[in-house]
Amino acid sequence: MGVIINQSAKNLVTTYLGFGIGAINTLFLYTNFLTPEYYGLVGFLLSAANLIWPLMAFGVHNTLVKFYSSYDTKQEQDKLLSVILFLPLGIALILGSIGFFSYDLLLDYFSEGNALVQPYIWMIFVIAVATAYFEIFFSWSKIHFQSVFGNFMKEVFHRACVSLLLVVVYFDVLTVEGFVYSLTGVFILRTIAMKLYAFRLYFPKITFGFPHNRSFILKYSGLILIAGSVAMVLLDLDKVMIERFLPIEMVAVYGIAVYISSVIAVPSRAMHQITYPMTASLLNKKDKKGLLDLYEKSSLTLLIISGLIFLLIVTNIRELYELIPDAYQISFSIVVILSCVKLYDNLLGNNNSILFNSDYYRLVLAIGIFLALLAFVLNLVFIPMYGIFGAALATFLAFAMYNTSKLVIVYKKFGIQPFTKETFYSLFLILVFSLLFYFWDFSINPVVNILLKSVMIGTGYLAVIYLLKFSPDINRLIEKYSRRR
């Protein structure tokens, strides 16, 4: 238990550190050191690679974690590791061959509108392969209960390298084109470092042949492939489709709004590390009362915490955009829509943990596939009509239906739902504070304005939450922090 707590604490620190570096890159370095066109190009390449790498990985990174400890002999474990190493390589070779023989068609596809993408198309494939194998070697380290180095490489390393490369571009040591190529090198270097670390933990004896439960492994990997692909489609499809219908710089403008809104999702990542095993235990024990209690508490706690972050974003967005170049200005409504998506995600509490640890996971996958296709159609319709606002609207509608469907499934199958009267009180409080402080500005420096408003909002919001006793867990957290002060 001490090892788990120690590594969890270190992983939480590196996650927040990586997010902070990413925020500096997204809001200040990219916007000042690259032109909007090249910033948009980088965003498109990374988003396109994110859509492809789950297909190349074929879900084996999750398969490794699930099945490795179930084998009693080193021979069976080595067979699994060998499959994990070579199966994605075979898929990558097949996709690479298809891409090689259809390269002219790809060039023709990008010849209209955003020809800037043409010289860099191959990078999508390389980054995708590197990312797939990075995730595999990261899982390799996890099965040996060593996750700190991998989490650092995943959250911090490439973002820190990007910061360094952007500074080098600023001092004219590296060209912008060289930066784009170097970015690919960063992902390759990250994978090599992760590979060396994984092999240092354990180097398998390469064998050709599947472990004894081959069909089960392939079925599970296929399900994870679908799940990963659906998740990536819902997250990155909008940015990829913006490139098709709008100038490439619009990907950068939209990407900033996406990153700002993603701050709201940070608390849920930390909480889910705790609630996932707790939910699995409650399901195994068939403790419905305990499951309902965790469902309600996780939903309310995440709503209150993420609601504060939501408030800080929507009430300070105008001042924040004053700090970045005019070329990246975006409609307030787009940031609000994307932030509402993240707020709704948090409102679900441990809903995903309930579904993924139950027998209804396949049902969620089927719905996810349908909604991924729906998201494609919505983007196809709305982006030409409304520009990047259409992309935000399509994302909001797709996620709203996806999240609502998951709530309905849990309610129908388990007879529980996470909402209490405190949920609606909290939502009303968030609405009131949003309307009150959005129009309240200090006519001073934007940074000072943000700091003053944030202090006022944070103090007032938490005071109301505490005094009205919306959440005993939040109250205990506030009291604990206050005693330390």
Image (cartoon, rainbow, N blue to C red):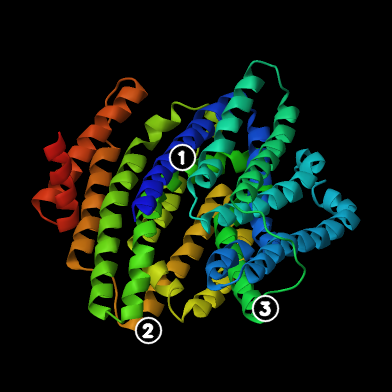
Work out whether residue 449 or residue 7 is closer to the camera in this orientation and state it.
7
The spot of residue 428 in percent (x, y) is 22, 56
Image vertical order of residue 323 relative to residue 188, above or below: above
Q: Which mark is residue 19?
A: 1
Question: 10 Å neighbourhood of mark 2: few (<14), some, or many (≥20)?
Answer: few
Q: Are marks 3 and 2 in contact (CB under 8 Å)?
A: no
Nearer-N-terminus badge (1/2): 1
- For this rendering, which residue is in front, 78 or 465? 78
Residue on which disc 3 sits: 214
- First-in-chain label (3 vs 2): 3
Residue at horizontal 60%, vertical 31%? 161
Q: CA distance from mark 1 to mark 2?
A: 36 Å
Q: Amino acid at mark 3?
A: Arg
- Nearer the observer, 151 or 360: 151
Query: In the figure, 124 relative to 81: above or below?
Result: above
* Quadrant of the snapshot with the N terminus: bottom left
Query: Which mark is drawn over residue 132?
Result: none
Q: Position of residue 22 (x, y in %)?
A: 50, 36
Q: Residue at x 64, y 60 (%)?
A: 54
Res 199 visible: yes
Q: Which residue has dot 2 on it?
A: 413
Image-quadrant location for residue 321: top left
Whether residue 147 sits left or right of residue 172 in the image: it is left
